[in-house]
Amino acid sequence: MNEPGLVVARYRRHGLVEGSEGSRVLCQIKSRSLNPVVGDQVRWRLEADGKGIITVLLSRKSALMRIDNQGNPETVAANLSQLVVVLAPSPVPDWFLLDRYLGAAALAQLKSVVVFNKLDLAESPPDELADYRDLTDRICMTSAKQGEGLRELTACIADERSAMIGQSGVGKSSLINALLGDARQAVDDLSKKSDQGRHTTTTAVLFGLPEGGELIDSPGVRDFAPYIADSREVALAFKEIDRHSGDCRFDDCRHLAEPDCAVKAAVASGDITARRYESFKNLLELTESLQQNRR
Ligand code: GDP
Ligand code: ZN
């Protein structure tokens, strides 16, 4: 009786669920212990009063996790295959934030794409971007305004379920509008209708793309840091640090002051950039301080 569905938007007490025939129904969530997020597979049913209810949360293939200010894990989206991180010449890129986004993708075993948008405003892409060639699956250069690079971006996301993330003002909404074309309006109208004015649409929303694939718009993820339960796993968030860490003398090397640390040797030789190493230490510090908060 309970049919399978996909959560395409999550509000405080409700989830918007897409059923098997593609219609979207606003559903209550049966219990507080159930916490479906965008991308979740659920079971749901229509109640006698015509309202929907989510009754079961099915297991997740992947989960993008962030840490909240209290040091607790928070699931941003589920069952993603890819994270798309958008940067632009303005606002000025926060490279440490980019590292934390890419770290979250690595920890959730997601592919990643870095989009440098507002290409029309840049004389040349920033030097730092070149450091990311080996650290991400693709780098796309776009201008949502002039339409440049959109075909390439469309191809990057066509067979994936991606979440788009980035500092406010980099052009995420503009890119999504450009990628969705007329489909955007239809989704917004539907979302408003099912909201019946009672819900804000500031949460993550999943869109089906006309060229295939799905894109999750996840606004409001400022000050993002990945959730890492054990601070020894911070190195897993940095691909090149993780790669070198197998050669450290001690298995439990923290890559700080230990002798014969292969990571520090790679920093000294320039194989790992000083900035990425700094970024690793920042995330380690943050993770450890939030862990202490939690106790
Ligand atoms: P969001 O906060 O990431 O969703 O960013 P928006 O899509 O709202 O864009 C922020 C501002 O940047 C708006 O004024 C857009 O018109 C502008 N913008 C977005 N993409 C481009 C671009 O490719 N070139 C230029 N010049 N401006 C852009
Ligand atoms: Zn080490």
Image (cartoon, rainbow, N blue to C red):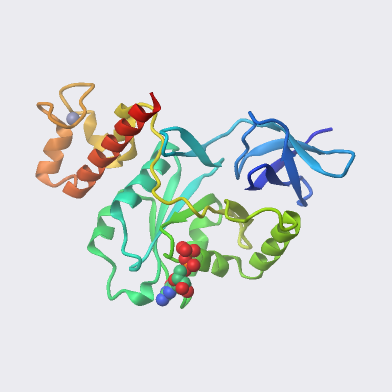
Q: Nearer the viewer, residue 105 or 218?
A: 218
Extreme residue toward the right, this view: 48
Q: Nearer the viewer, residue 267 or 87?
A: 87
Q: Residue at x 16, y 47 (%)?
A: 274
Residue 199 relative to residue 166: left or right: right
Q: Quadrant of ligand 1?
A: bottom left
Q: Nearer the viewer, residue 38 or 263?
A: 38
Q: Residue at x 79, y 42 (%)?
A: 52
Q: Residue at x 74, y 43 (%)?
A: 27
Location of residue 38 in the rendering, given as x and y in whole percent from the top left corner: 60, 45
How many numbered circles are shown?
Answer: 0
- Which quarter of the picture shows residue 47? top right
Q: Quadrant of the N terminus?
A: top right
- Which quarter of the picture shows residue 107? top left
Let me know if residue 149 appears in the view: no
- Which quarter of the picture shows residue 235? top left
Q: Quadrant of the C terminus?
A: top left
Extreme residue toward the top, this view: 251
Location of residue 121 in the rendering, given as x and y in whole percent from the top left corner: 35, 76
Location of residue 164 in the rendering, given as x and y in whole percent from the top left corner: 49, 55
Q: Residue at x 23, y 46 (%)?
A: 276
Residue 160 relative to residue 168: left or right: right
Location of residue 44 in the rendering, given as x and y in whole percent from the top left corner: 76, 37
| Vertical placement of residue 242 versus 224, above or below | above
| Vertical placement of residue 82 versus 236, above or below | below
Let me know if residue 103 appears in the view: yes
